[in-house]
Image (cartoon, rainbow, N blue to C red):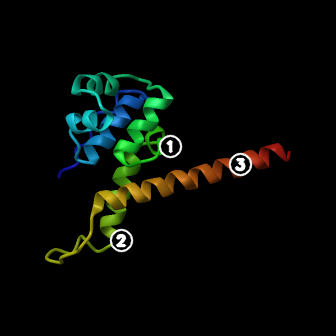
């Protein structure tokens, strides 16, 4: 599977675009997501072109994609590419001819969710500091 960076001309808060990219990174077709949600491909296409998605639907989508709602909301193409680059480098995958029993997509999702958690904790800490002043 190759990862292609799409132009990021759509706003950072475009939930539909984030859903689309996570779905693509999971190597899932719109039809498969539609089936998991009990709908059809046209509905998924429309949702992925929407800037916002209702909270209840977003929870269902996150579950179907195997990620958290926060991971969708905070998704960043740059962060994923950094994680992939660091994962490949840190795990020695750059060494040609070495076989690894390693699944990069699962690792990317795990690392991305950890990144989101660290950012949350940092924000909570900064908010606490602001309140104490």
Q: Check disc 2 and report the residue beneath it.
A: 90
At 25% from the left edge and 35% from the top edge, which residue is drawn? 35
Badge 2 vs badge 3, beta-carbon distance below 8 Å: no
Q: CA distance from mark 1 to mark 3?
A: 19 Å
Drawn side of residue 11 relative to residue 27, left or right: right
**Residue 5's quadrant in the figure?**
top left
Tell me the SS state at disc 1. Answer: helix
Q: Check disc 3 and report the residue beneath it.
A: 126
**Residue 29's quadrant in the figure?**
top left
Drawn side of residue 128 relative to residue 104, left or right: right
- Figure check: 121 above or below 101: above
* First along the sequence among labels 1 and 2: 1
x and y, in percent, of residue 10 in the image: 37, 27
x and y, in percent, of residue 38 in the image: 30, 32
* First along the sequence among labels 1 and 3: 1
**Residue 117's quadrant in the figure?**
bottom right
At 29% from the left edge and 33% from the top edge, which residue is drawn? 7
Q: Nearer the viewer, residue 5 or 74?
A: 74
Q: CA distance from mark 2 to mark 3?
A: 30 Å
Q: Nearer the viewer, residue 35 or 51?
A: 35
The circle on residue 70 is: 1
At 30% from the left edge and 66% from the top edge, which residue is drawn? 88
At 37% from the left edge and 36% from the top edge, which residue is drawn? 18
């Amino acid at each position: 599977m190759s990862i292609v960076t799409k132009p990021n001309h759509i706003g950072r808060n475009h939930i539909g675009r984030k859903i689309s990219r996570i779905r693509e990174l999971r190597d899932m077709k719109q039809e498969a997501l539609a089936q998991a949600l009990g709908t059809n491909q046209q509905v998924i296409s429309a949702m992925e072109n929407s800037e916002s998605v209702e909270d209840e639907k977003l929870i269902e989508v996150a579950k179907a994609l195997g990620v958290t709602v926060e991971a969708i909301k905070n998704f960043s193409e740059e962060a994923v590419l950094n994680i992939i680059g660091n994962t490949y480098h840190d795990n020695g995958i750059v060494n040609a001819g070495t076989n690894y029993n390693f699944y990069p997509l699962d690792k990317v999702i795990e690392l991305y969710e950890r990144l989101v958690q660290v950012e949350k904790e940092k924000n909570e800490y900064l908010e606490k500091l602001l309140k104490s002043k």
